[in-house]
Amino acid sequence: MHPCVEDIVVPRSLEYLSRDDAPELQVYYIQLVSSTSSIHLTPFLSILQLGSLLVLTSLSSGTHDHRRILLQQGALPLLLKLLTSDTRDDIMQEVYSSWNMADSPYYRLRLLDLGALMPILNLLKSPHSRFSLFKIATFCLSNLVRGKPRVNFVQVKPALPVLQQLLHSTNEEVVIDACWALSYLLDGQIDIAEDLTEEGVCPKLMELLNRPSETVILPALVALGNIAAGFIAQTQAVIEANIIQILVHALHHDDFDVQKAATRAIFNFTCRGSTFHIRYLAAQGCIRPLCKLLTCSDPVLLSNCLQVLDSFMSVGEADKNMGLHDGINVFAQMVEKHQGCNNMERLVKLVHGHVQNFYLALKILKRYWPRRFYSLFDIGQGW
């Protein structure tokens, strides 16, 4: 980076942007209207101010050093001031574009500390906002709550009812960004999951799973999976929203990312849910597609599938030990029927398989199919 960027370009750009009492900077532009061949004079932005804002926008999407300079020289408070002003929409769009600085965790937290959330929410709640700005603001909101370290819930809680309303938008891009924002907020934060459950978000997310677009289905599935990762109350809310059949259907989806998100959602159900929830999931037809997915090569998806199937069979084993189902582990029986056992044997035989999944498959085989387990190594059961 050239030294003049830090020493001259940024300071001068910030100076121009902060000036609101310099008439020599105000200009008019000539707009030719071809249909009438007439000329209109329209008040326009200061050329220098607009150019300065374009410079800062370019730097904000640059390297870490570029963003560091903007932060050190006080660009963020000035951009925030522009955001809350009566600036024209065209310059407002440039201000919002500069919010890609929120891709960096440190700068995202600084933006939140400076109060960047409220003007974005105000624009999203305003019935007079231009739709182009509305879309940009939704993207900015999603960026502000994205990534780790997770944002302070106290700072972002006012966004929850706004996000719920955004889910009802007729614009797919807005819905996608709102879904991702919810999934980010829900990731590992039980208190947020409780608030969103109270807001009635689950039924709308369930409805979005019926959309034909994978780009909508995926974040909706991730958000529902993160809700299910909360307490049993959240898991019960998702079940009561009747989304299980949709999740099972998503396991058969052609898009791999959708399959992976659906598996993750079901994995969260089994981790946090009760034995009743696990039995309910199995009864809805989860086992067959999960057994089929054991043939994939993605280690994360394989791990989730193995752990979910192990949860099912663990409940089945408890029922068997209590004398239920004529002393048969019905879930292990279903896994074997749908080739799950054969697929686990294949995982064990893979020379370059994932080590964690190798041992997980071995553990499952040894517990529920000991004869198959020992036959893999051609050894006796004393091994």
Image: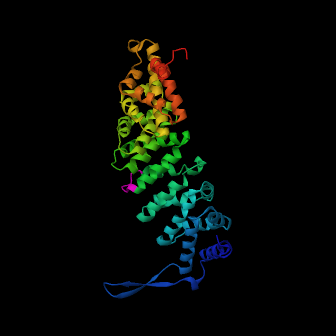
**Residue sitting nearer the eye, 305 or 382:** 382
The picture places residue 383, in percent across and down from the top left corner, at 55, 17
Q: Residue at x 51, y 33 (%)?
A: 357
Q: Is residue 171 magenta?
A: yes
Which quadrant of the figure has residue 6? bottom right
Give the answer, above or below, for where 173 lies relative to 313.
below
The picture places residue 213, in percent across and down from the top left corner, at 35, 50
**Residue sitting nearer the eye, 64 or 224:** 64
Q: Is residue 234 visible?
A: no
**Residue sitting nearer the eye, 268 or 91:** 268
Left or right for 113, reference 268: right
**Total number of numbered discs in the rendering:** 0
Give the answer, above or below, for where 91 lies relative to 34.
above
Q: Residue at x 40, y 41 (%)?
A: 259
The picture places residue 99, in percent across and down from the top left corner, at 54, 62
Q: Residue at x 33, y 84 (%)?
A: 34
Q: Quadrant of the N terminus?
A: bottom right
Which quadrant of the figure has residue 9? bottom right
Give the answer, above or below, for where 137 lies relative to 30.
above
Left or right for 337, reference 89: left
The segment highlighted magenta reads 167-172
Q: Is residue 251 magenta?
A: no
Give the answer, above or below, for where 347 lies relative to 208.
above
Which residue, as the protein is rendered here, is positioned at the far left?
35
The picture places residue 244, in percent across and down from the top left corner, at 38, 35
Predominant SS along the magenta part: loop
Which quadrant of the figure has residue 33? bottom left
Q: Is residue 83 visible?
A: yes
- Which color scheme did the rendering employ for the protein? rainbow
**Residue sitting nearer the eye, 271 or 160:** 271
Which residue, as the protein is rendered here, is positioned at the far front?
378
